[in-house]
Image: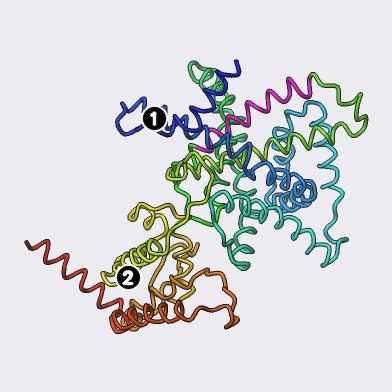
Amino acid sequence: MQNSLEKIVGFLQQGLWEIDIRGRPPLQGRLLQGMRLGYVLARDLLVGQLTMRAMSLVYTTLLSIVPLLAVSFSVLKGFGVHNQVQPLLEDFLAPLGQKGTDLVVTIISFINNMHVGVLGSIGVALLFYTVVSLVAKIEDAFNHIWHIATPRRFIQRFSYYFSILLIGPVLVFSALGITATMMSSAAAQYLISLEPFGTITYVIGHILPYLFTIAAFAFAYVLLPNTAVRLAPALVAALVAGLLWRAVGWLFTVFIVGTVKYDAIYSGFAIVIVLLIWLYISWLILLLGAQLSFYLQHPEFVRPARNVQTLSNIAKERLALAVLSLVGGAYLRGQPAPDEDELVRRLGVPFDLIDPVIHALSYGRVIIAVGEQADRYLPARDLEVITLYEVLACVRAAQSPLLPMDPNHRIDAVEQLLTRVDRALAAEFATQTVRQWLLQQQQGSDHAKSL
């Protein structure tokens, strides 16, 4: 038994990655790719930061769930659809059984007893801060999954979050209210009494909760990360995560709430313990789906080890010139500014290797990030004043640890050699501008096409 387990683990860690998928039939290739994807997801779940971030979100949720619902309830009350909050909350806490129903009643009573006028300006500010902090922590978790180091700017976060918190619930609950009204109309009831419309309505009624769950997951995967997430990976991940969340909810009700007698152990705290476990599972599934959408959009990260890849200095210089060639070339030809996804696709290099190079070029004021999500790149200055020596120098000096500056630690022969190298680079490239270099490329390409 132990030998068989060791063989399986060995195959997943090494043998699976040595198979050349490109030489396999399409169906077999997809199966192998799916096994690789399942392995990296299981690895991230077991040894990654998903569990810690899920636990952090559980704590934040406990602090902000009542203020969040209070803000949404206040907005929805103005549109007359606030009565839809309780059914949706009951659906989310349905895996808790009767305890979930009792908890919903308690939460709704808290919301009804909350009077904004009594809180004062400071209390209202703290109320909104608690709500915004939950969304900010979710975005930070998603940015970590997507390998994004820079969050949205404060002003952008403020407007973005309040759009989600104020407009999002209105649209969702309005859609639910319109659907319920249409289904209860006389015409709809007449159609339901006819076949096959009755059977179709019955099936749709059972499928609709799953569709709303999948739509909610897809909404989070597309809008929350501070990057451009394509719709197809987000929908696939939402489908998997939504169905998994529903299935795990059913299992949670049957095997946890239905069989384990928490009341005998925790007495009055049983409902709190069960709620914590369910919140943790829910956040973990949401983050796992975000991880899946990341891998689907960036399959180059599906690799056996989590080790961070690094580039040699000459590889960084080569990559910097390649990035500048694409960014500057698009600018000279009047084409749209390339984003990071296009750079990854055109250069065939994962963006965790491109990011440090882009950061170095941005810090050296060679390129600049533009766009709503600051993910498209243009030359930061006139290409006629940026020299190739300046480009190479900013990449060579980027993120270099400082060596001791005490002259007693220096070796004169080393310093003299490095000075000669720097002078040779300056003599060769200090007078050649990026614009001249790009135009030479363009002329060479046009000449090759004419031949």
Q: Work out whether residue 388 can be spotted.
A: yes
Q: Mark 1 points at which residue?
A: 30
Q: Which residue is drawn at 73% across and 55% down?
A: 131
Q: Which of 310 and 180 is in front in this view?
A: 310
Colour pattern of the rendering? rainbow
Measuring 11% from the left and 66% from the top, which residue is drawn there?
447
Q: Which amino acid does label 1 sit on?
A: Arg
**In terms of secondary structure, what is the magenta stretch mainly?**
helix
Q: What stretch is highlighted in magenta?
A: 237-258
Residue 95 screen position, x and y as percent: 73, 28
Rendered location of residue 103, percent (x, y) = 82, 36
Indicate whether 394 appears above or below 48: below
Name the residue at the left extreme.
Answer: 451
87 to the left or right of 357:
right
The question of residue 242 being in magenta is answered with yes
As drawn, 418 above or below 50: below
Q: Nearer the viewer, residue 239 or 82?
A: 239
**Residue 210: horizontal and vertical position, in percent?**
58, 31
- Location of residue 416 by image quarter: bottom left
Residue 139 % position (x, y): 62, 53
In what element is the residue under mark 2? helix
Q: Can residue 185 be seen in this view?
A: no
> Could you tell me which secondary element the residue under label 1 belongs to?
helix
N-terminal label among 2 and 1: 1
